[in-house]
Amino acid sequence: MILILLGPPGAGKGTQAERLVARSGFRQISTGDMLRAEVARGTPIGREAKAIMDRGELVPDAMIVRLLGDRIAAESGHNVILDGFPRTVPQAEALDGMLSARGLRLAGVIVIEVDDAKLTERIVGRFTCATCGAGYHERFRPTRIPGVCDRCGGTEFIRRADDTAQTVTARLAAYHRQTAPLLPYYRRQGKLYPVDGMADIDAVAAAIDRVIEGLESAAGSPKCDRARLTHPEAGL
Ligand code: AMP
């Protein structure tokens, strides 16, 4: 099953994608994580992308489509959750082309809806464990012991360079201008599933699980680990 998680920056796409990976055997493809890895390695793509990302703008479609294409090919045969891709209509068209060339079909697009006013406070204050990548927030999801990762006990944390109040404004503007047109695009395909992202993390996760279960029964052949999905406590 191939799913897209769509929503503005700070909606919780990464958090929810992580949960799907842990609970239901999905592979997460995050184009933001892929670009940050290119930046960290100092590759030509990373050098070109860094300044654009720091301004809160979108990198060119051709660059991201090339990166994504290689990765989709590597993950073929797995349940995949796309987090942060597509972000423009040309990217969505390229994805449609890539999938149909491989005989694959997009199952659905889950949109996490959050009011703009909430997004800045959600983004500014985020941090991640440098060792295991677990995500936290100063106010909304602090570590149980201050300065110690709940998951791995690590004590080093990192903040994204673009999680600043100034950059968030530009990222939100990019979302409304370039990414929001994907909503009518996928609505026309009958693939859009909105969930209320203002609810707490567990409630959003439960809403996403219900969408996936509906998609599985509509497809008639469950491909992800349904036992673990319908009993979320299993495997946690
Ligand atoms: P994210 O981690 O998804 O918030 O992405 C961080 C940044 O990476 C974005 O603000 C963009 O600059 C860039 N980026 C990630 N995914 C894409 C994409 N699909 N298209 C264009 N730029 C992207």
Image (tube, grey):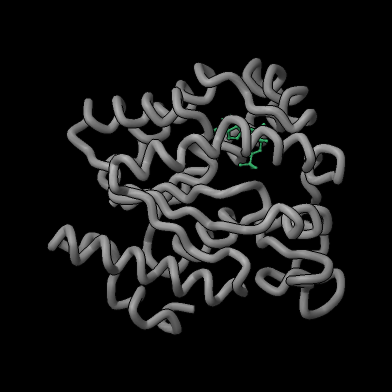
Q: Can residue 128 be seen in this view?
A: no
Residue at 36% from the left image edge and 30% from the top image edge: 95
Q: What residue appears at the point 54 percent right and 19 percent down from the top-left corner?
A: 63
**Horizontal placement of 83 versus 26: left or right?**
right
State which image quarter holds ligand 1.
top right
Lateral position of residue 126 relative to residue 88, left or right: right
Observer-nearest residue: 22 or 188? 188
Residue at the extreme left of the image, as rendered: 220
Return the x and y of residue 28 as percentages of the image width and height: 46, 50
- Residue 3 image point, x, y percent: 37, 50
Query: How many numbered dots are placed on residues in this image?
Result: 0
In the image, is 45 to the left or to the right of 30?
Answer: right
- The residue at the point 39 percent across, 69 percent down is 209
Q: Nearer the viewer, residue 96 or 66?
A: 96
Q: In this view, does 6 lie above or below 50?
A: below
Name the image quarter holding residue 117.
bottom right
Q: Is residue 65 above or below residue 224?
A: above
Up-down relation of residue 93 to residue 222 (above or below): above
How far from the left and from the top, in percent, is residue 46? 67, 23
Q: Residue at coordinates 76% horizontally, 34% vertically from top-left? A: 170
* Residue 130 position within the rendered picture, expressed as x and y whole percent measured from the top left: 74, 54
Which quadrant would residue 122 be assigned to in this image? bottom right
**Observer able to see residue 177:** yes
Q: Splitting the image into 4 quarters, where does residue 106 fall?
A: top left
